[in-house]
Image: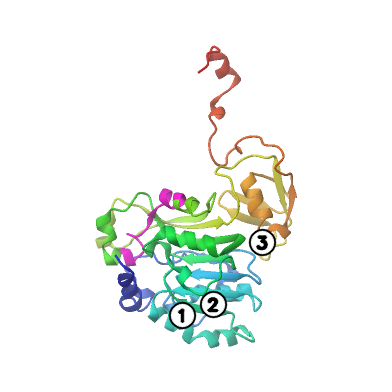
Amino acid sequence: MSHADVQDYYGKVLQGSQDLKTNACCSPDDLSDALKSALSNVHDEVLSRYYGCGLIAPEMLEGARVLDLGSGSGRDVYALAQFVGEAGFVVGVDMTEEQLEVARRHQDWHRERFGYGKSNVEFHQGYIEKLDALPLEEGSFDVIVSNCVLNLAMDKPAVLREAFRLLKPGGEMYFSDVYADRRVPEALRSDPVLYGECLSGALYWNDFEYMARAAGFGDPRLVTHRELTVENPELEAKVAPIKFMSATYRLFKLDLEPECEDYGQAVIYKGTMQGAPHLFELDAGHRIETGRVFPVCGNTFKMLKETRFAPHFEFIGDFSSHYGVFAGCGATSPFDSLSETGAAQAGGSCC
């Protein structure tokens, strides 16, 4: 597969979301009220050319600089433009000329619809593996998003490395993509329909986590995931027995440890984030109720204290005392299998 094949599929073969042959590049129906409201202000033509697999509207975007990798016709850019407000800015990057033409054609329409004095979005044509070729300043973005596009990239590690470079310290990459339960055979990767439908370019989830860490994103956090069913008998037979899922991850540009370590720390959520008065969900394993003392590992402590989320939490503890691996989070310590009974039965032998 090549960039030209993907450009042809998304620029010429697909003329609208109704042309998709599977449901892999389709978002779920359970949109938040805030996102539904934002999408109601997006032009119909932009919506009709949308191909995505997840929801990429993280919390606390007011005034933020956001970069959308693989922005297509601009649906997510224009939705996020409302969340960042007139003081924020959203940049979309896509390689497909036909998609960008749709996005740019309606730029003034959206500015007027939002009631902004000037547009707070811009679009660049380019490859997400080669962001250094675009006029994007290193360390200039608070949040980077992407919706079902990493699987289409020819050089996926390069995308992650470039995202890390462009983020500010404490910034976040928040994105959805398709993943496989095993490595996809090379023969399937050369199928233009399977690749264009976001299936045969999907990463084995464990390979993705390794790539993310290698790019500098320690401790990738899974936010949501759901099973994908192909719902096309011919294509389903081709990919069987591989299983696919759509998953949203958040990756932070922070100095994090390889594992979740226990320093006796805790946080208290103040309930002050808009739309989340009772509960803040950092990821699938951290649902933090308002007012509750919530013990956290050192990495989670940093994800909250050294990012845009800090004003909304009280922080208890520091890094002065270490108590080993955080129970129920991260790696399993070999000491977990020991007990007083087991130690006694060992008979005192060593090494």
Which range of residues does the magenta coloring cover? 195-210
Query: Is 198 a magenta residue?
Result: yes
| Labels 2 & 1 near each other (Cβ < 8 A) | yes
Nearest the camera: 210 or 289?
210
- Checking the image for residue 133, the label placed there is none
Question: For mark 1, what is the residue?
Answer: 46
Which mark identifies residue 78? 2
Query: Mark 3 falls on what kind of element?
Result: loop
Q: Secondary structure at mark 1?
A: helix
- The x and y percentages for residue 64 are 63, 70
- Taking depth in this image into account, of 48 and 220 the one nearest to the observer is 220
Residue at (51% x, 73% y) in the render: 76
> What kind of residue is marked 3?
Arg
Seen in the image, is 94 located left or right of residue 81?
left
What's the distance in space between the residues labelled 3 and 2, CA to CA?
22 Å
Q: Mark 1 or mark 3: name the one nearer the start of the chain.
A: 1
- Callout 1, which amino acid? Val
> Residue 121, position in %: x, y?
56, 79
Examine the structure image and report whether residue 84 is included in the region drawn in magenta: no
